[in-house]
Amino acid sequence: MNLEPQAASIVIDGKTQVIVLMAWPSTHIRTPGFFNALCAERGINAVMVPWAVRPEHLDAAWQGLRHIDNLAGIVLTIPHKQNAAPLCDSLEGDAGLLHVVNAVRRNADGTYTGRVYDGFGLVDGMLRRGIELAGKRVLLLGAGGAATAIALSIARHRVAQLTIANRSADKADRLATLVAHTTPGARIDSGPAKARGYDVIINATSLGMKPDDALPVDLDGMGADTVVAEVVMNPAQTSLLNEAAARGARIHHGEHMVTAQLESFVEFLLEAHR
C-alpha cells in the first residue's frame, strides 16, 4: 500500500463518519493523513481527526463522545492506550488479555468496544518487507501500550528469544511474565538495552520523537545483519534509525506499523456504519 497523505481529497458532508484520534501531544501525529488517503481512494465517507487530549481529561472527552451519533470510533496513541482500556464497555481479542486498546468502535447504543492492532501492525509491516522473525533473537525496547501488544505478537511468531528492556525494570519483568504465560514454550525474559547479540531490535518507546532524545539502546556490538525497527512515525528518520543505518544495519520505519493497520481500522470501525 502506497498512500500519500498529502494527496488525500475528501469531501465532508452530513453523512460523514468521524473517527477521533486521541493523543497527547498531537503535533507528531501522521495516522490521520494515511487513513484519510485510504478513505478517499476507496470512496469511503469517513474522516479521522486528531484530538490533543491531556491524560487527566481522557475520561471527560471519552464520555462526551458517547453522545455523538456520527462518531464511528476512537483511535488511541501515546499516552492513552492502557488508560483507555478500562473505559471500554467490552474488549475483544488480545485487548481483553492485555488490557490495552488502540482502536475503539462506538456502537449504535453508545457503548464502546475496544481492540488492539499494534502487535499485528508491527509484525505484518515487517513481514511485508521481507523481515522474518521466526528463529530470530529480538530485543524489544519499552513496556507501555504499544510494546505490550507487540511483545505478544512477536512471541507468537516462533522467535528464538525475546528480551524486553525498559527504563523501569519492574515493568519489563511484568510484561515478560505476562507474555510468557500466554505463549507456552516461548523464550522470553527481560534485560538491559544493549544491542549485542540480537538479530532484530525494535524501539517501542517514545524516545526519538524529540531531537534531543537519548538513544533508547546502546548499539555498540550490533551485528552487521541486524534489523533496527521503529514505532515512532514523526520524525520518519529518528536518531536511532540514523545511527543504525550509519553502522550498516537494515532499518524499518515507524509508519509501516500504522499503514499495516489501516485495513483493520476500516473493517472494525466503519463496516457497521456503511
Image (cartoon, rainbow, N blue to C red):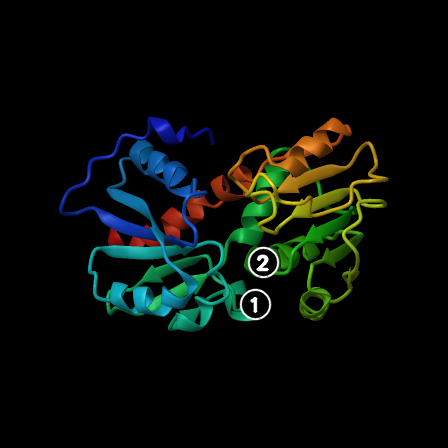
Give the mark nearer the N terminus: 1 vs 2.
1
Residue 134 locus on image (x, y percent): 74, 47
Which is more toward the observer, 64 or 178? Answer: 64
> Can you identify the residue that label 1 sits on?
98
Q: Quadrant of residue 7?
A: top left
Residue highlighted by disc 2: 149
Query: Could you say whether the residue bearing mark 1 is in a helix, strand or loop?
Result: helix
Q: Position of residue 25 (x, y in %)?
A: 43, 51
- Image position of 75 with respect to 106: above or below: above
| Amino acid beneath label 1 | Leu
In screen coordinates, is 189 left or right of 4?
right
Q: Amino acid at mark 2?
A: Ala
Q: Residues within 10 Å of mark 2 (few under 14, many from 20)?
A: many
Query: Left or right of 216: which side holds 117?
Result: left
The structure residue drawn at horizontal position 79% and vertical position 54%, both measured from the top left corner, is: 161
Residue 157 in sight from this viewpoint? no
Which type of secondary structure does the marked residue at label 2 adopt? helix
Is residue 119 shown to the viewer in this render?
yes
Residue 84: x, y in percent? 43, 66
Q: Nearer the viewer, residue 194 or 256?
A: 194
Kindly identify which numbered label has been placed on residue 222.
none
Q: Residue at x 37, y 58 (%)?
A: 53
Occupied quadrant, residue 142: bottom right
Q: Is residue 88 above or below residue 193?
A: below
Q: Quadrant of residue 250?
A: top right
Q: Is residue 199 left or right of residue 178?
A: right
Q: Are marks 1 and 2 in contact (CB under 8 Å)?
A: yes
User: What residue is at 47 percent from the left and 67 percent from the top?
Assistant: 83
Front residue of 89/168: it is: 168
Q: CA distance from mark 1 to mark 2?
A: 7 Å
Q: Percent x, y for residue 98?
A: 56, 67
